Amino acid sequence: MLDGLDLVLRWFLEDVRGKFPDSPVLFADESGGNLHRGTIRNRLRRLMELEGRPAAERFSPHGLRRACATHNYERGVDLVAIQQLLGHWTVSSTMRYVRPSATFIEDAYRRAVSTAVGELTGQEPTA
C-alpha cells in the first residue's frame, strides 16, 4: 500500500501543491487551511469506490497510520521512533497501532528459540 509513496509525494509537491494558496500546511484546503479529517476520509472512500475496489480491500486514513506503524516496526524501527512519528504521548498508544503479521511473529519466535538453544548447547544459532 505504501510502495512508491515518495513518488506520489514528489508529484504532489511539484505539480499539485502550488495550485493552492501559499500556506505552511502540506495538505491545504482551498483557503490554505488544514483539510478536515472527514474530507480526507470521504475523498479516499470515494476514490476507492470509483476505482471499483471491493469493500474488503478498502482502507481509511487511520488504516494508513496503522500500516505505517506496523511496516516500520517489522522493518526494525524502534517503537519510540514510531511513537514520535505518529505523534503519540506514550509508547503504549503506539503499541496498539502495531499489528505484526503472523509470519513476523513466527520468525521472531524461531529466532528466540534458536538463540536460546544455542546458548544452552554452546552452539551458534542457525538462521
Image (spheres, rainbow, N blue to C red):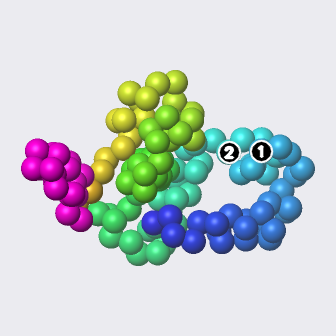
Q: Which residue is mark 2?
A: 35
Q: What SS does tag 1 mark?
A: loop
- Which residues, given as a range, are shown in magenta? 107-127
Of the 4 image quadrants, the one containing the N terminus is bottom left
Q: Residue at x 29, y 63 (%)?
A: 56
The image shows residue 52 at horizontal and vertical percentages of 41, 75
Q: Quadrant of residue 102?
A: bottom left
Residue type of the residue flagged with mark 1 = Val
- Residue 127, labelled with which disc? none
Q: Nearer the viewer, residue 42 or 101?
A: 101
Looking at the image, tell me whether mark 2 or mark 1 is earlier in sequence order: 1
Q: Is residue 82 left or right of residue 98?
A: right
- The image shows residue 61, relative to residue 46, as above or below, that is above
Q: Residue at x 64, y 66 (%)?
A: 6
Q: Nearer the viewer, residue 41 or 113?
A: 113
The image shows residue 75 at horizontal and vertical percentages of 43, 56
Q: Is residue 3 left or right of residue 8?
A: left
Q: Nearer the viewer, residue 5 or 46?
A: 5
Estimate how packed mark 2 is, as few (under 14), some (14 to 19) or many (20 or more) residues with alpha carbons within 10 Å.
some
Q: Residue furthest front?
A: 122
Q: Residue at x 15, y 50 (%)?
A: 122
- The image shows residue 127, relative to residue 61, as above or below, that is below
Q: Are marks 2 and 1 in contact (CB under 8 Å)?
A: yes
Q: Residue at x 38, y 72 (%)?
A: 53
- Residue 25, labelled with which disc? 1
